[in-house]
Image: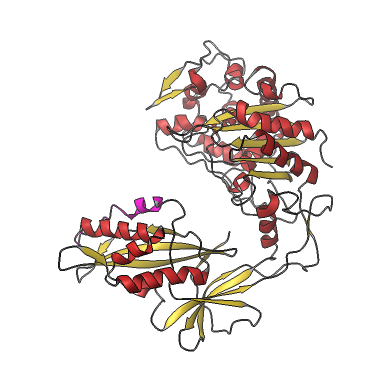
Amino acid sequence: MPETRNRTTSRRKPRKAARSATAAALVLAVAAGGAYLAELGPFAADSSAADPDPAAVAEARAFLADWAGGRIPSAGRRTTDPGKAQDVLRNFTAGLSIDKPTLTAAKAAVSGNGTVSVPFTAKMPVTDLGTWTYDSKLPLRKQQDGTWKVDWTPTLVHPKLSSTEKFRLEREDTDRPKITDRGGAALSGGEHPSLAPVLNQVAGAAGAGPRGAIQLVDRATGEVKGTEATFGKKPDRPTDQPIRTSLDSTWQAAAEKALASEAKGKDAALVALRIDNGEILAVANAPSSGFNRAVSGTYAPGSTWKLVTTGALMLKNAVKPSDIVDCPKYLTVGKQFHNVETGEHRDATFLQDFTESCNTAFISLRDKLGDRELGDVARKYFGIGQEWHIGIPSFDGSVPAPRDQTEKAASMIGQGRVLANPLLMASVTATAVSGTFHQPTITGGTKDTTITEKLPQDVVTQLRAMMRATVTDGTAKVLADLPGGVGAKTGTAEVTEEDPNNGWIVAHRGNIAVACIVEKGKTGGASAGPVVRSLLSAVTADPS
């Protein structure tokens, strides 16, 4: 969803065809359970000013939590004008179709008159349009009884909201053009439920679908004083001209069926793409509606990331498949790391470490790479962390430099702050087995600003052989009876100490690369493996 910052344009009258909605104030609901409140403090004042009273800071936290969580009566009672605050906070959301905004507070400061000011950034998702982002301030004043309250004023909701001016949402809907698969067959969310949000994104990227604006208007006359945010863009093609995607109806149907039958009701996602050019053939999510976790999700990739780690080690000739790299149950690097089910393989070769996905062996090789080297290899050869333009919004991966040796150890096995999703890991797989990164795409004509280099052929040859061995002799045996020389890598990614692990698998066959995650799947072979097996069993031929 596009994000729009505040801006003011010249006066203009609303379009006749647009639907108008008026509002007086805005209710904020948190998008992530109030986690943003951690950013409220500590409030470090500069050396020339007094520190804010901790009681004021606590009251600010409580007010923001109530306001963001939709507990409007409670939020109102924390202000100097409870009745008015409740009315303003309650009415504004409905008028502007705001859905689950996020508030991010900055440093608190003490003003000259003794009040405490808490600046914050509001990100307001406007239903079906985009996110309106602006900054405001939360004032707090000490009361006669010694307590602190929010000093109510409409401007804390938005700096331009006042007794004389309010905001109005203008919408303008346009018909969505026909969207087809690579062969020209029409695609719909009815036939392919996972594509419902994807097709909306494809249409939006082409300028189709809803557009709108948030306007500042005079309360008495309705005169437009300015435009605070605009959403959408004018279509870049005639609305009667179909939009052709790279998707393949056969692969899409098989991917959705595989998730429905094998993910066991868990949240999951899958991407299949062509190795030779990065064209996306299938994007499937479970549940099928809502967030497109396959393309925009942010997950630790777990041991599937060992494709990148192995590539980095082999680029330096730091290890060979036949080298002995011991695989103990535990290895301590600031904290204790272990293998799945605390397995061990004494005197194992590096090939065995790869096929059995030994965490401790990979972590023991961390000193073979510089602190930034893993991220540099990911970017230089796999395109990770560069800006991708696939045709719809996507998360393109993150491999930050480790802050300490513990984090470096974690990054070797796809944990710590390494983040990916099925789209990214399908692309990693395609690059590993071909040697060449191709920016994934779902529509034609997308720009490619990535700059990468080819992996050396000897590295590609070894990665392919190791992935094949993982299927024949390792953790991906669930795919062993499939024809076509399938290669794969499984992954188990820790989420928290309390929650079950996410299960991953990446695989390739012919000209196809696939990646799948099953949330809370515990292990990749047992949870994501059957999904990919179902998909590759159902579709045996590569698309043209």
Where, by quadrant of the figure, is residue 426 drawn? top right
Q: Main secondary structure of the magenta part?
A: loop
Residue 69 shown left or right of residue 491 in the figure:
left
Is any part of residue 510 visible from this angle? no
Magenta-tinted stretch: 35-50
Say whether residue 76 is magenta: no
Looking at the rendered structure, the number of numbered marks drawn on it comes to 0
Work out whether residue 377 or residue 59 is closer to the camera in this orientation and state it: 59
Residue 318 shown left or right of residue 483 in the figure:
left
Question: Quarter holding the N terminus?
Answer: bottom right
- Whole-percent x and y of residue 505? 63, 31
Is any part of residue 522 visible from this angle? yes
Quick check: 351 above or below 25? above
Quick check: 292 above or below 258? below
Quick check: 409 above or below 229? above
For the point 79% across and 26% down, the residue is 484
